Amino acid sequence: MELQALLEKAEPILRQAGELVRSIPHPAVHSKEGHANFVTEADMASQQFLMEHLSPLLPEARFFAEEQEENKMAPGFNWVIDPIDGTTNFIRGYQPSAISVGLVQDGQGVMGLVLDLGTGELFTAVRGGGAFCNGKPLQGAQAPLENAVIVFGTAPYYRELADATFAAAKELFLCCGDLRRSGSAALDLCHVAAGQCDGFFEARLSPWDYAAASVILREAGCPLDTLPGQAFSYEKPQAILAGSPAVYPALREIVGRCLGLSPRL
């Protein structure tokens, strides 16, 4: 199936998954391995729904999903799913949370869909086809670094990266307009693509956090990569840096230097 046609069939599935998640306002919560790492019955219901309904669209595709016990990227197509990105926010009723579905083909991101569970905005892109939010084209901002709003994640499951993360945040804070931290990396990255923010970094994210948004960002004209000297991958956790063309070079230099000094990376 042609990618644009596949996207059009996947969009209502994400919206239906969003309705399902919102219908479970007080889900049962369970802890996973790692600090402050949770899964809810809403995560599991969302993932099951997505896998059941996406599978017929592309029967040859495999699934690489957060709440799946074993994940291995296969040759060909792989759906990369975060059933709720920002689960802690969702549990607390704090708005930023999303459903994120990316499609990776032989190691390359080719499609991304991110549904904002609070606003209902649906960010979408296919490789070579541009990026959109509810059908409206996206383009990164053009603000210079001194006026830029930078969003970042604290990699809360990896407390050993705190010093490097906050060293980078402090240095950026002293030369940009301001900093933000929302708790949903997928939405942060989409907001950079939409020009609502100018840059993003996090010392370690899993592929389901950034697979969909990476396609959306790049189609909006915004670079995204991992640390200098490391190979970007959709198969393992890694640092993620992204930004508008005006901000990205400085962000990459500052964050790359600060995180590059960490023996944990």
Image (cartoon, rainbow, N blue to C red):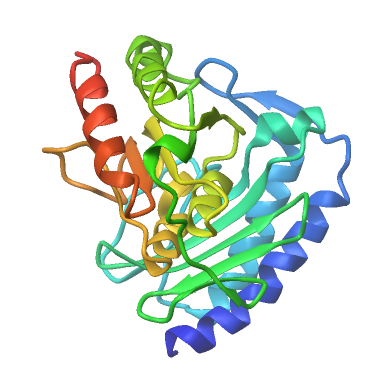
Q: Is residue 78 visible?
A: no
Q: Is residue 40 left or right of residue 125?
A: right
Residue located 83% across and 36% down the image: 27
Relative to 8, residue 40 above or below: above
Residue located 74% across and 36% down the image: 90
Relative to 112, residue 156 above or below: above
Residue 64 point in image, percent of width and height = 43, 53
Residue located 53% across and 48% down the image: 186
Q: Is residue 215 visible?
A: yes
In-front residue for pair 103/52: 103
Quadrant (top left, top right, bottom left, bottom right) of the N terminus: bottom left
Relative to 231, residue 130 above or below: below
Residue located 29% across and 71% down the image: 76
Q: Quadrant of residue 144?
A: top left
Q: Quadrant of residue 84?
A: top right
In-front residue for pair 88/244: 244
Residue 259 point in image, percent of width and height = 26, 22
Q: Is residue 138 left or right of residue 84?
A: left
Relative to 52, residue 129 above or below: below
In-front residue for pair 226/11: 226
Residue 16 point in image, percent of width and height = 76, 67
Residue 159 point in image, percent of width and height = 43, 12
Q: Is residue 30 left or right of residue 224?
A: right
Quadrant (top left, top right, bottom left, bottom right) of the C terminus: top left
